[in-house]
Image (spheres, coloured by chain):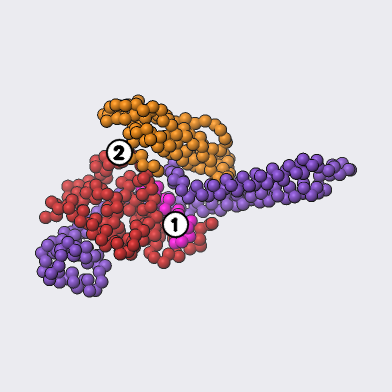
Amino acid sequence: MTADSHLPSRDELEALSESGFALAIQLLSRHEDAADVVQDSLRKLVHSGRYKAQKGSPLAWFLKVVRNGALDTLRQRRPNDDEAVARLAATAPAPDIAVEREELAGIMRRQLEAMPVSQREIILLRDFHDLSYTEIAEVLGIAPGTVMSRLHRARNELRKRMKKYLK
Amino acid sequence: MSDTNNIIVVTTPDIPGKNVIRTLGLVRGNTIRARHVGKDIMAGLRNLVGGEVTEYAKLLSESREQALDRMVDQAKELGANAIIGLQFQTSVIMGGAAEMMAYGTAVVVE
Amino acid sequence: MKHDCQETEPLISGYLDGELTQSDRQRVDLILEDCEQCSLAFAEMKKLRKGVGSLSFDQLTETEKSNMTKNATSGAGSNLGQFLAITGLILVYGVGACWFCWEVVTDAKFVETGEAKHKLPMFIRLGLPTLTGGVGILFFTVLFQRLKAAKTDKYTDVQI
């Protein structure tokens, strides 16, 4: 019922919240929605008392919770919301990110946002969050053997979209 | 959530940029929800200290979403692709519960 | 080395991530030396990987982070409190009602008034336990319905 004695430390929580927020914002685009999801996930982590008892990597478990929360939020967004979010994502980026807008990174970010969530998330989990295939399988809830082919398909999709910029 | 992906729901009498080509009539959804007694006790205690009663705020949100979903389901059955003139309505039937009705006019727009 | 470029591509992806078996890795090493198409795929994927890895995204502010960690650990008490309160209610009302009915049915002495012990009228001695029993059954029906519905209730995670 109450929090387990194996409470994660403040530093561990803050580190997890950073990674979790990165994933959440990659899926949701909106700062506040992502922050809410991370807050909920942190609370679940603390109250479940499963932190130290993880046989896998605690980061992978936490990202799984964050991902599920983010997908729930996506499902609850009404179609009018989606249009508004897409418009938001396409316009005014944060000031410090604006500089890279004309460079490859900015184009890549836009292409990633245009891709379906399932492909976007696996590429980011591998190349941004540096998770191993087994960890990715845990986060997505799929069989470890299928990670390589799924990841490859997603990468191919990104390759197709970035073809003209890769020369 | 039910897939409201195809239905536009607005509170205005029309949707700018789209024309109403057919009106299908009134659609509505309602629900009454309550939270368990532990939450009720907490809400009662907030009366002593003040501030937002988050238990009941969440309760209202749950009722709102469920009423909306039921209304949209009814509109889908009629074959609508939009609902205009959405309104919310509450009634008092029991204490510690949130009653919510959502109603609007189901239409076909293009 | 004869190979189907389409088939080898997923392996190249795995090679890039260092997730191949020893034998597969050696295979890909050889293929990359010979096949131009596969080498191109490898180079492009490598560039993309670097690009994605160096993307910067919106981040939590310091205050947000510290507030979040504070809030995460603070709610534990309310769950315990609710649990205790509900247990207390079940004890007082549930077990208490059973005890009360038992006393009424066996017509214990606690209903004494004045000097003479008045017997409770029959309709109360029978009616009260029946009422309590009925309400008890209804309570459990409602409870089980709620527990079943809670599994498929899609509104529990609704944001305020």
Identify residue for label 2.
A84
Q: Nearer the viewer, residue C144 or B51?
A: C144
Chain of the residue on which disc 2 is drawn: A
Q: Is residue C35 above or below residue A90?
A: below
Point 66% across, 44% down: residue: C134
Chain of the residue on which disc 1 is drawn: A
Please identify the quarter of the rendering in which residue C31 is found. bottom left
Q: Nearer the viewer, residue B48 or A47?
A: A47
Please identify the quarter of the rendering in which residue B73 is found. top left
**What is the spatial separation of the Cα atoms under label 1 and label 2, in whole angstroms?**
32 Å
Chain in purple colour = C
User: Mark 2 belongs to which amino acid?
Assistant: Ala
In the image, A133: left or right of A45?
Answer: left
Labels 1 and 2: the sequence-earlier one: 1
Q: Nearer the viewer, residue B29 or C84?
A: B29
Give the number of the disc on residue A45. 1
Point 13% across, 64% down: residue: C39
Chain in red colour = A
Instruction: Please report the bounds of the magenta region as a residue range.
Output: A34-51
User: Mark 1 belongs to which amino acid?
Assistant: Leu
